[in-house]
């Protein structure tokens, strides 16, 4: 049985104030979705809403630290009150450890894992009951090629975990009308990657991939697709990645 989305499913997008999140917000609003945008930087969200929602009926903004249970519950309460049931959850909020070794900054361990992994698990669990009841839902998790090739310790740990969560959840949901998908970007130009000197594409291709997964869910999408070769190379010839990792640092 094919489960079709309700008209104009309501989308919640975390980490929406910059980078991939900001590009995804533009993509989704451009496609006509009603979108709840969540992030810690409210002023950035306000500027984005003014740009995207001149009529005032397509975008809700909510200040949210996804690591806090109270903020997660408030986000969902506000989103449901304004736009109704959640049809799509995009877990995009993420941080890294700034390129430093994790044992040199032990305070970053919980911050990275709670933001990148645990918050996605918690938020997914909060929306799953209503999605399962309606027999429609899309859970989309923004992972990373770092979830296939370990370089930055904490970031890779969180993204390896997110990949495992998404792929296992997808199998648990088979036949329910609810799907779980992972988008795994390579290096793209965002605030998080600004310290790297080499050229990178912008976040727009990732945003388009996220939007396509709403209409046509897949287990996992790597963006850009050329990173499939990088992943294969890393698995077959790990010494080459060792050499490259020294250059990236």
Image (spheres, rainbow, N blue to C red):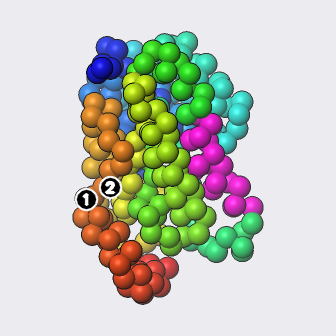
> Is residue 156 covered in magenta?
no
Label 2, residues with CA under 10 Å away: few <14, some 14-19, many ≥20: some
Q: Nearer the viewer, residue 147 or 10?
A: 147
Residue 69: give x, y in percent of width and height: 71, 34
Q: Is residue 98 above or below residue 28?
A: below
> Is residue 119 covered in magenta?
yes
Mainly helix, strand or loop, the magenta region?
A: helix
Q: CA distance from mark 1 to mark 2?
A: 6 Å
Q: Is residue 9 above or below residue 213?
A: above
Residue 99: give x, y in percent of width and height: 56, 71
Please tell me which residue is depicted at 75% across the width and 66% down the height of the picture: 106
Most distant residue in the right direction: 107
For this view, does 114 lie left or right of residue 34?
right
The residue that label 2 is drawn on is 222
Residue 11: give x, y in percent of width and height: 42, 26
The residue that label 1 is drawn on is 225
- Residues in magenta, as a range: 107-123
User: Which mark identifies residue 129?
Assistant: none
For the N terminus, the quadrant is: top left
Element type at mark 1: loop
Q: Is residue 49 visible?
A: no
Please tell me which residue is depicted at 46% across the width and 32% down the height of the picture: 173
Element type at mark 2: strand
Q: Quadrant of residue 170?
A: top left
Q: Is residue 209 visible?
A: yes
Pointers 1 and 2 in contact (CB under 8 A)?
yes
Please tell me which residue is depicted at 50% across the width and 40% down the height of the picture: 169
For this view, does 186 lie left or right of residue 123?
left
């Amino acid at each position: 049985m094919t489960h079709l989305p309700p008209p104009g499913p309501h989308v919640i997008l975390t980490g929406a104030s910059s980078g991939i999140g900001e590009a995804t917000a533009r993509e989704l609003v451009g496609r006509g979705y009603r979108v709840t945008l969540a992030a810690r930087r409210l002023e950035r969200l306000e500027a984005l809403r003014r740009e995207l929602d001149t009529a005032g009926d397509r975008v809700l903004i909510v200040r949210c630290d996804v690591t806090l249970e109270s903020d997660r519950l408030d986000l969902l309460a506000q989103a449901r009150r304004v736009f109704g049931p959640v049809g799509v959850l995009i877990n995009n909020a993420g941080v890294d450890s700034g390129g430093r070794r994790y044992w040199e900054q032990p305070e970053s361990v919980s911050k990275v894992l709670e933001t990148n992994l645990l918050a996605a698990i918690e938020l997914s669990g909060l929306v799953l009951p209503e999605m399962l009841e309606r027999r429609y839902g899309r859970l989309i998790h923004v992972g990373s090629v770092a979830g296939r090739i370990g370089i930055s310790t904490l970031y890779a740990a969180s993204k390896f975990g997110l990949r495992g969560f998404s792929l296992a959840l997808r199998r648990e949901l088979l036949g329910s009308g609810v799907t779980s998908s992972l988008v795994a970007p390579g290096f793209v130009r965002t605030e998080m990657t600004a310290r790297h000197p080499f050229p990178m594409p912008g976040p727009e291709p990732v945003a388009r991939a996220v939007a396509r997964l709403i209409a046509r869910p897949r287990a996992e999408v790597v963006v850009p697709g050329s990173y499939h070769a990088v992943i294969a190379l890393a698995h077959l010839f790990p010494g080459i990645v060792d050499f490259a990792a020294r250059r990236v640092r």
